[in-house]
Amino acid sequence: MPLHGVRADSEGDQAGRPGPERGAEMSAVDVTRRWFLASLGSAAVATGFLPGGAQAGPLFGDVSSRGYSPTLWYEISGDGRILVHVTRAEMGQHIGTALARIVAEELEANWDHVEVVHVDTDPRWGVMITGGSWSVHKSFEELSRAGAAGRIALLEAGARMLGAPLKDCVARASEVRHGARAISYADIVSSGSVTRQFTEEDLKAIALKPASERRFLNRDAAARDVPSKVNGTAVYGIDRKVDGMVFARPVLPPTRYGNSIVSWDDGAARKLPGYLSTVVIDDPTGTCQGWLVAVAESWPVAAKAADLIAVSYRSDGGAASEDQMLAEGARLVENPSTGGIFFQEGDPLMRIAEAAALHEGVYRTHTVLHMHLEALNALAWQDGSTWHVHAGNQWQSVTLPLVAEALGIDQADLVFETSYLGGGFGRRLYCEYIVPAALAAKKMGRPVKLIFARSDDTKFDQPRSPTVQRLRSVTDGRGALLAYDHRCASGWPTRSIFPEFLAPSADGHGTVDVFAINGADHWYDTASQRIQAICSDVVHATMLPGYLRSVAPGYTTWAVETHIDELAHKLGRDPAEYRRALLGAKGRNGGAAPHAVGGANRLRAVMERVLEKAGWSAREALPPSKGMGLALGTGQERDMPTWIATVAQVAVDTHSGAVTVERLTSVVDAGTLAHPDGALAQVEGSMLWGLSLALFESTEYEKGLPRDLNLDTYTPLRMTDVPELDIEFLRNDHMPVGLGEPGVISIAPAIGNAIFAAIGARVRDLPIRPAAVRAAMGA
């Protein structure tokens, strides 16, 4: 399709502990929680707000030899191509397509002209992070206004070139049209006629199109990244090569923390043809404690050499087992002096103390690993005074200062290149594995690609830590929640990775990791409630707790929705009817514009629809040992809720305790869908991840390391275990919210509640093992 030309016809429109606490490293960029939150706002990101308050020069109305950039978020070239600059990582969620469609919508672009460009870590891009289901939600406003700015500027220039009144011209499919005449964006840009600049105030004042005029959003399109992934041309971190590159594999100490090397011997490794050297990682950041790196001309040789290197360590022996971490969690939730307050309303403790009847439950989850398909890897090299890193990375803005400090260089002399990620799921939010790659490259004086074996990857994963939650509630005679108290003990990922992002406790004493407790502040009407997060030092002495897909709601929703179901049955109420009664959308549960319009009424709407689709009213007709369970969820964060309701139908073998999930039905309200096909794929994948976490995935720590180091014993969901999936989106034009994680969270409690409906046995631990089901049957 030609991109140039004025045409005179009319066509249709085209649609811790000893671990390195991160405060010292981050001081180099003066990052604060206030700065980070501010920089995620549309105005700050749109202007390229930078670490330390620096600015990157003019960002608006950039007219260059390459084309026209109404804002830094895209460029229209003289040949008509529209290059959308994407700072988010692509790890299977087709984020480039989704963000580009937001720009194209307001720009009135021809979709065939749009290309996605994943950018490097030039400071002008501001904060670079992909996680929390934030990407579309946090970018929607700024990208919409960026697209609209281009449309306005091109309309003005196009009207002048056509000699037509501006008010009589329209922008459509990368053209400015006046009646039967039209001029392409390509010709407008190549003529140099478009020069308008936009200030922050200009962008804020732009009136976006009404939803009724949208031509891209809420409409399907093919994802831009699919062809390259199918034909093998897509470049992942593990694919990248540079001249003179050598390979390396880490030699890891016996535990994550508290190790130092006493002696080492590479005599056996030196006999391998292609073996080059062993590098002792002297890491000034304290991230790599007792690491070596085996370097060779090829990775197979480096991998074998790492196994042959004999190392003697000195260790402080502070690591704990899974049972010890869970026991400490149980102790912490019972100790009233522990924890910070995430949210409190009223005085639930007084009501609990005065109550004649109290419902209490303790809910646990075990350690979960990421097990992404692409093993950890990083390529580092120096080019003149500039260091380069190529690696899959979800949070460049945190990893970059860490690596710069390790190398002893200024951040201005370090550039991260972007690659596709062969699975992230939160593991690549903190890429400490880049440090040994960079230090090995510095020592060797040549490019080094460090690749982890699967066992290395697993040993030093950043798992979702084991958790213990205690919930207590009091109801009145009608079942209304008078008091609700939720205490959760876990590892806090943010404490080790980005402590500046810890929030102050609501009582003014201490801090809270919101990413360790989100989801506990549910949308059910409650007269008084308290939500507390408790950090387990025993967990932090053992592992570097990380972010895993769905983060806190993966376990807090398990506790909330199991507890609510228990209350319903204790009160003799139908679980759906009881939830309906609690979803009154009162007070803060009424929601607020623009992120949570409708509040709990939208949660009730997805629940009503899923009950209809799943045949809830006919569940009593199911055969013995089969049952349906309901669970609701609202995604990663309360201020950007993705409303989801799930009904699980299960069959339980009462002899073995084995659970078969026969069907999962989910209804989702995620507001406007930037890329509906990608949204569906994300929900499908996240539901299956949730099923895997519910029944299969977990490991146990023994002597400071996970017991299961590979997929022979760590057994996620298999294809034979996939049930029938029935997924529906409630379509509307509300603010788009996140879809990377919400599908996970309602699956496990729906399954647990279905088990109770089937056999009357209540399980409170994840994953739900047959032995636990048998034990619950005998309880």
Image (tube, rainbow, N blue to C red):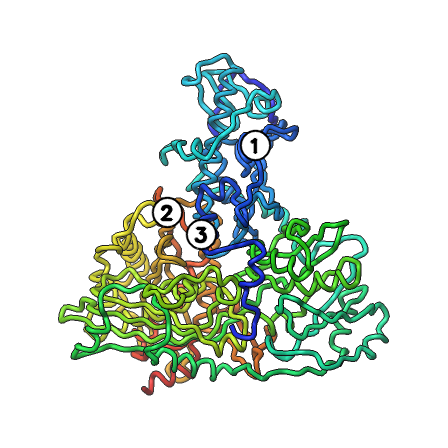
Q: Which residue is at 46% across, 32% downward? A: 148
- Residue ranking furthest to the left: 477
- The kind of residue on which mark 3 rests is Leu
2 vs 3, front mark: 3
> Which sits earlier in the primary sequence, circle 2 or circle 1?
1
Q: What is the number of the mark on residue 69?
A: 1
Q: Please state if 400 lies on the left or on the right of 467 as rendered.
A: right
Q: Which residue is at 37% across, 85% downward? A: 775
From the viewer's side, name the closer residue of 754 and 135: 135
Residue 331's place in the image compared with 632, above or below, is: below
- The kind of residue on which mark 2 rests is Gly
Tell me how many marks there are: 3
Q: SS of the residue at dot 3?
A: helix
From the viewer's side, name the closer residue of 26 and 468: 26
> Which sits earlier in the primary sequence, circle 2 or circle 3?
3
Residue 393's place in the image compared with 672, above or below, is: below
- The kind of residue on which mark 1 rests is Ser
From the viewer's side, name the closer residue of 7 and 191: 191
Question: How would you rate the neighbour count of disc 1 (Cα within 10 Å): few for under 14, some for 14-19, many for 20 or more?
Answer: many
Which residue position holds label 3? 37
Which residue position holds label 2? 671
Task: Quote the CA–CA distance across marks 2 and 1.
Answer: 29 Å
Residue 778 at what x, y percent from top left? 33, 87
Q: Circles 2 and 3: CB distance less than 8 Å?
A: no
